[in-house]
Amino acid sequence: MSDEFKIGGKVLQSRLFVGSGKYSNNRLIPEIIKSSKSEVITVALRRVDFMDEKENMLNFIPKECVLMPNTSGARNAEEAVRIARLARETGCGNWVKIEVISDNKYLMPDNMETIKATEILAKEGFFVFPYMNPDLMDAKRLRDAGACAVMPLGAPIGTNKGLKTKELVKILIDEISLPIIVDAGIGKPSEAAEAMELGAAAVLVNTAIASAENPILMAEAFGLAVKAGRKAFLAGTGAIKEFAEASSPLTGFLN
Amino acid sequence: MRFALNGKEAEANNGISVEEYLLQKGIELDKIVIEYNLEILKRIDWKSTVIKENDKLEVLRFVGGG
């Protein structure tokens, strides 16, 4: 059964987006892409270190992958816009993950500044993927500002705590016509499957894969879990009942 | 001649272009992006833009991130 994911001018087969942060070695990146079957990878923009020039990480990302630069480091809308414009200038496409954070302890996104940046960048032709705190009214504002998806957090970045915001994410899935991509906090493949069963369009995973003992195997596990969760969503889960209902016939017993 | 490079003080010969300077420093020019006095410097202008005293140059590229 064909279940293509059309988003940001692309047609994707995989609904798992991966992050490229926290890997001990960039050489793992192509292996992660291969085993997870992911087609979208996030990257960050940083100053070149003139004292310690390392090999460009783009050399490790397969050409057919869609790059999603993030605006990490931005503390307000203005900085996010500046980073997004610079990222586009590299010639790596016009997708951008808006990330505006000024809280250092929980790395909670600033929805208000994110909405402002989304509005500006969508008008400039970017495909804007805003990382947000799952609030329905703010998700509507992001939609109206021209976002092409909304990316609510499951739990704080890098915590591996899972889909703690499940009920709020469910509301966004029900009420917002855009793809809902769960970003941040997903720690295990079962939690990625849970998000997909709920009706999320995709999930973005970084730390859970990068911090696994065997990241390549974990990437594969996430790829399969996202697929399973998506199929379960499409299949439509059965109703939950209060009391038992026998699965075997209640007649014709041997006695 | 002194200028600011990625937030730190740097020195370059008079009359050197942005592109020449980066090549001298051994920077891979592919897939980097440059901000020159807070404006994006288009790739086609790297050769013709000469670094001047007190200029602010930001040279950026992608790294791993989530």
Image: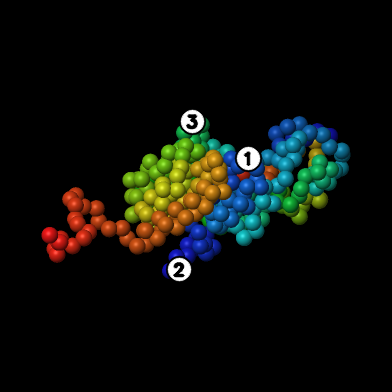
What residue does disc 2 label? A2
- The quarter in which the N terminus of chain B is drawn is top right
User: 10 Å neighbourhood of mark 1: few (<14), some, or many (≥20)?
Assistant: few
Q: Are marks 1 and 2 in contact (CB under 8 Å)?
A: no
Q: How many marks?
A: 3
Residue A105 lies, in percent from the top left, at 48, 30
Q: Which mark is residue A24?
A: 1
User: 10 Å neighbourhood of mark 2: few (<14), some, or many (≥20)?
Assistant: few
Tag 1 and tag 2 share a subunit = yes
CA gap, disc 3 and disc 2? 42 Å
Image quarter of residue B14: top right
Which element carries disc 2, helix, strand or loop? loop
Tag 3 or tag 1, which sits nearer the N-term? 1
Which subunit holds the residue at mark 1? Answer: A
Residue A9 lies, in percent from the top left, at 54, 63
In the orientation shown, which residue stands out farthest toward the front?
A: A255
Determine whether A246 is above or below A77 in the image: below
What residue does disc 3 label? A105
In the orientation shown, which residue stands out farthest toward the bottom?
A: A1
Q: Residue at x 62, y 49 (%)?
A: A29
Three-letter amino acid code at the position of disc 1: Ser
Q: Is residue A84 visible?
A: no
Residue A107 lies, in percent from the top left, at 49, 36
Image quarter of residue A237: bottom left
**Looking at the image, is mark 3 or mark 2 nearer the viewer?**
2
